């Protein structure tokens, strides 16, 4: 595992416990698939959370929990939840602390660091919880707002991690 944190706690406005933390998940959840979104206004992010909602059972069949991390305050994340009724955790990361800790890509140097709207890129991280020390087992770092793995690719990565 890199220096990424094994656990964190964020407000959850979606399904599941609030606050959300890796350690509070049931023991039968082997993997957590964290989808790091760009920002509240991102159209591609909004499409992605809805696609995940349609495929959430495929993740559960692989003993995985999906969670989207939005670098926004809880009230903005709650607006997404009200609009899309997501059946999985939707986490508010208003200071982008967890997003930064998991190395969510940021473009345009300092300008990108100052504005999530300009610089934060999408990312997906799979955390393997099967051992006592959870570790990052797979990552996908987007280079543009359009650069996201399709759900089938993430499910294939989970299948590979599960050995099946």
Image: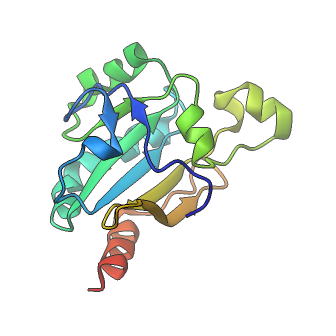
Residue 121: x and y in percent read: 62, 45
Q: Is residue 52 left or right of residue 27?
A: right
Indicate the quadrant containing the C terminus: top left, top right, bottom left or bottom right: bottom left
> Measured along the vertical axis of the image, is residue 45 above or below residue 153?
above
- Image quadrant containing the N terminus: bottom right
Viewer-side residue, 26 vs 125 = 26
Is 108 placed above or below 28 here?
above
Q: Is residue 158 left or right of residue 25?
A: right
Q: Position of residue 82 (x, y in %)?
A: 24, 21
- Decide which of 55, 99 is in the foreground and name it: 99
Quadrant of res 27: bottom left
Colouring mode (rainbow / by chain / secondary structure / one colour): rainbow
Task: Name the residue at the front extreme.
Answer: 132
| Residue 131: % across, % down | 34, 67
Between 143 and 18, the one lying in front of the other is 18
Q: What residue occupies the far top of the structure in this picture?
A: 75
* Residue at image location 21% in from the left, 53% down from the top: 56
| Identity of the residue drawn at 49% across and 28% down | 93
Residue found 52% across the figure and 47% down from its top: 5
Q: Quadrant of residue 158?
A: bottom left
Q: Is residue 37 above or below residue 117?
A: below
Q: Residue at the spot x=15%, y=66% of the render?
A: 61
- Image location (x, y in percent) of residue 106: 71, 43
In the picture shown, does residue 75 fall above or below 65? above
């Amino acid at each position: 595992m890199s220096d990424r944190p094994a656990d964190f706690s964020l407000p959850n406005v979606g399904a599941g416990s609030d606050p959300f933390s890796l350690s509070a998940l049931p023991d039968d959840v082997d993997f957590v698939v964290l989808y790091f979104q760009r920002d509240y206004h991102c159209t591609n992010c909004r499409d992605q959370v809805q696609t995940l909602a349609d495929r959430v059972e495929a993740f559960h069949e692989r003993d995985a929990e999906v969670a989207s991390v939005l670098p926004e305050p809880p009230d903005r994340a709650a607006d997404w939840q009200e609009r899309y009724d997501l059946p999985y955790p939707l986490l508010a990361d208003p200071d982008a602390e967890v997003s930064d800790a998991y190395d969510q890509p940021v473009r345009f140097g300092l300008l990108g660091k100052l504005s999530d709207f300009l610089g934060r890129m999408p990312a997906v991280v799979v955390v393997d919880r099967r051992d006592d020390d959870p570790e990052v087992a797979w990552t996908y770092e987007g280079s543009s707002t359009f650069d996201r793995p399709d759900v089938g690719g993430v499910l294939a990565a989970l299948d590979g991690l599960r050995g099946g």
